[in-house]
Image (spheres, helix red, strand yellow):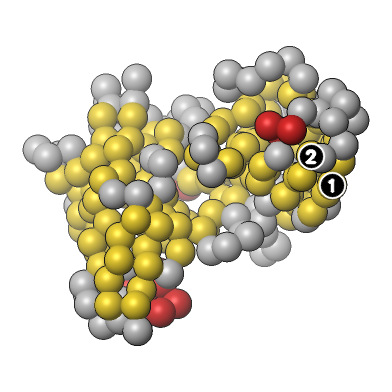
Amino acid sequence: KAGVTQTPRYLIKTRGQQVTLSCSPISGHRSVSWYQQTPGQGLQFLFEYFSETQRNKGNFPGRFSGRQFSNSRSEMNVSTLELGDSALYLCASFLASEETQYFGPGTRLLVL
Amino acid sequence: AQSVTQLGSHVSVSEGALVLLRCNYSSSVPPYLFWYVQYPNQGLQLLLKYTSAATLVKGINGFEAEFKKSETSFHLTKPSAHMSDAAEYFCAVSKGGSYIPTFGRGTSLIVHP
């Protein structure tokens, strides 16, 4: 069974731009969570989608948004990029029967 | 509320030595506990998990962890370190169900030849 995939793997943007990241969960997983990882703040939870609905939300500004499609694929969007948004963005899919999150390889975003 | 404390942001061992990475948690309900490993420029890979079955949990790559309720600990060990074990290790706690796990700040394991 294929793992969690994220595209693109690397991205360079400039301040003020917007970016969209994509995540495809493991087949059969209906929950997708997004995390931001930085050296200073560690791993921080952004939001979780389940069956196309946001089920949980972390403490991030409204510039960070997401959505989930009927095939469980999810996208995350960041508008008006700031230098501090430079980070590794990780996606994880969750299977309730296993009580476990499985992570993708991440998208490395650099904001200049 | 639940929280995780990983003692030591960096742990250094010699190849062949015992690896011990510490994790203490707090949880208002019986927890689910996890250890993940992250290699450079990669995502988090599940090493092992505790979900209220046996208190000694064996994972991949020779790692194991023991759930000690009285000490609220879930320390990760490996009898003999290998150079390939050098990575970042994260402990996480969850209340299960739809609850999002809480992650520790991570411990960087350095293995010297």
Identify residue for label 1: A12
Q: Chain of mark 1?
A: A
Q: Vertically, is A53 above or below B25?
A: above
Residue A88, which numbered label?
none
Left or right of residue B56: residue A16: right
Q: Which amino acid does the dot numbered 2 rest on?
A: Val
Q: Position of residue B16 (x, y in %)?
A: 26, 82
Residue B54 in view: no
The amino acid at mark 1 is Ile
Residue A13, quarter of the rendered image? top right
Q: Give the residue drawn at x 79%, y 54%.
A: A10
Looking at the rendered structure, the secondary structure element under dot 1 is: strand
Q: Chain of mark 2?
A: A
Q: Position of residue A23 (x, y in %)?
A: 76, 45
The reply, left or right, for residue A7 in relation to residue A4 is right
Res A111 label: 2
Q: Residue at x 84, y 47 (%)?
A: A12
